[in-house]
DNA sequence: GTCTATAAGAAGATAGAC
DNA sequence: GTCTATCTTCTTATAGAC
């Protein structure tokens, strides 16, 4: 990896652990394996590193959203895979989503940085809300709406049904971020949650 | 309010907005209405202010837990108020809990400080988990268990039922912390959540 | 207990050699 | 592009008068 990229990578790691103000330029340089002054050949100053991380993240998630639209809205609806979705596939969906967001290096570090900086930085607060509120509620709402249309689940309020599916997953995710030792418990709880969700909504609940 | 107390109060406000490292001793002193050096007559150093906030908080919540035990475990069980609990009282319970935690000055500021510092401070992470995971799941689990015993709700897994009641409330709370403009939406969503919860668990769901 | 003045040190950033 | 040396600024903390 080239130095300019490695700086972003190590800086993100440090920012996600300590927050921007607790990370010193020398810390970042140390991890990259250079001295602090060398770092200024790559970025104008400390803030520029932070901004570059956010910019790169915005690009990444724009790309991700694009591919989700393709795989989500169009292809999935056409293929009709949700019409034959079982409890097992619902379990798999939830578990995979949970483990991906928990362990994917980039998501995990970025989420922690957003968590730390959200009250001090309106831009990051907005990104947080988009990534962990608006996007998942709308994307999963679409999926669950399709599953409901197929007759496997029943509700007259897809928004609340989506909240009931997603908020326990989000909650367990933040618990594991804070205390990784709870992951095993969280996975067990996640399975029980989805099974119960499926039972609750798997019959008429007008 | 005496100066020593006012220092804690203003420091908590600042720490909850910017995080420990972004708050300067002079900022705290400014808000208190004194100069920075005067502050050192009350506390040995900046860290001592932070520690005093945590210590005071630990006392507060120990007291709160004590009174909850009295009003929760014993009195409530004896009085049998949960046996005549209606959907309206469930709505009231959820809404009052939500608004209390969202707007109570001390809880609100302390929760934000915990959020910011959790990954950098194991002690605060443990306090966070206690206040927003272990305590509410166990206390509300007890309440919902009693309501279930009374026959108003039905489940064979009180833990998951409690997760289904609490995690949407927690989720909405963190959303409002980040973006107070969403409070109106959150309150409406909270009501719909509880109504739907009551419908889902208000019949046999073994 | 509060102030002004100031010391001490930390951290960001630059200069200039290699 | 990286280094050492150094400057500058900011922040914590102390000294000592009132």
Image (cartoon, coloured by chain):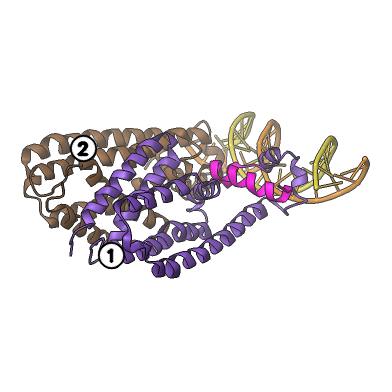
Chain colours: A purple, B brown, C orange, D yellow
Residue A94 or A22: which is nearer the viewer?
A94
Q: Which quarter of the figure has residue B144?
A: top left
For disc 1, the marked residue is A148
In the rendered structure, the answer to whether residue A107 lies left or right of residue B158 reads right
Tag 1–tag 2 contact (CB < 8 Å): no
Q: Is residue B24 visible?
A: no
Q: What is the spatial separation of the Cα atoms under label 1 and label 2, in whole angstroms? A: 41 Å
Q: Secondary structure at mark 1?
A: helix
Pinpoint residue B27: horizontal percent, then vertical percent: 53, 47
Locate residue A156: give its quadrant: bottom left
Whether residue A187 is visible: yes
A14 in magenta: yes
For label 2, the residue is B68
In the rendered image, the vertical position of residue A63 relative to residue B111, given as above or below:
below
The stretch in magenta equals: A1-24
Q: Position of residue A121 (x, y in %)?
A: 52, 56
């Amino acid at each position: 990896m080239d130095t300019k990229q490695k700086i972003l990578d190590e800086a993100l790691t440090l920012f996600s652990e300590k927050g921007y103000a607790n990370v010193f330029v020398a810390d970042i340089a140390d991890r990259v394996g250079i001295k602090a002054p060398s770092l200024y050949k790559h970025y104008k100053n400390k803030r520029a590193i932070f901004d570059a991380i956010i910019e790169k993240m915005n690009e990444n998630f724009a790309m991700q959203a694009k591919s989700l639209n393709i795989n989500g809205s169009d292809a999935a609806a056409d293929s009709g895979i949700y019409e034959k979705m079982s409890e097992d596939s619902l379990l798999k969906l939830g578990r995979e989503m949970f483990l991906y967001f928990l362990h994917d290096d980039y998501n995990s570090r970025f989420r922690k940085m957003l968590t730390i900086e959200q009250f001090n930085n309106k831009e990051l607060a907005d990104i947080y809300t988009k990534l962990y509120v608006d996007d998942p509620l709308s994307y999963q709402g679409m999926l669950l709406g399709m599953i409901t249309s197929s007759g496997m689940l029943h509700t007259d309020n897809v928004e609340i049904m989506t909240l009931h599916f997603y908020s326990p997953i989000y909650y367990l995710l933040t618990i594991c971020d804070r205390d990784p030792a709870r992951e095993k418990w969280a996975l067990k709880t996640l399975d029980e949650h989805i099974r119960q969700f499926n039972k609750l909504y798997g019959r008429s609940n007008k």
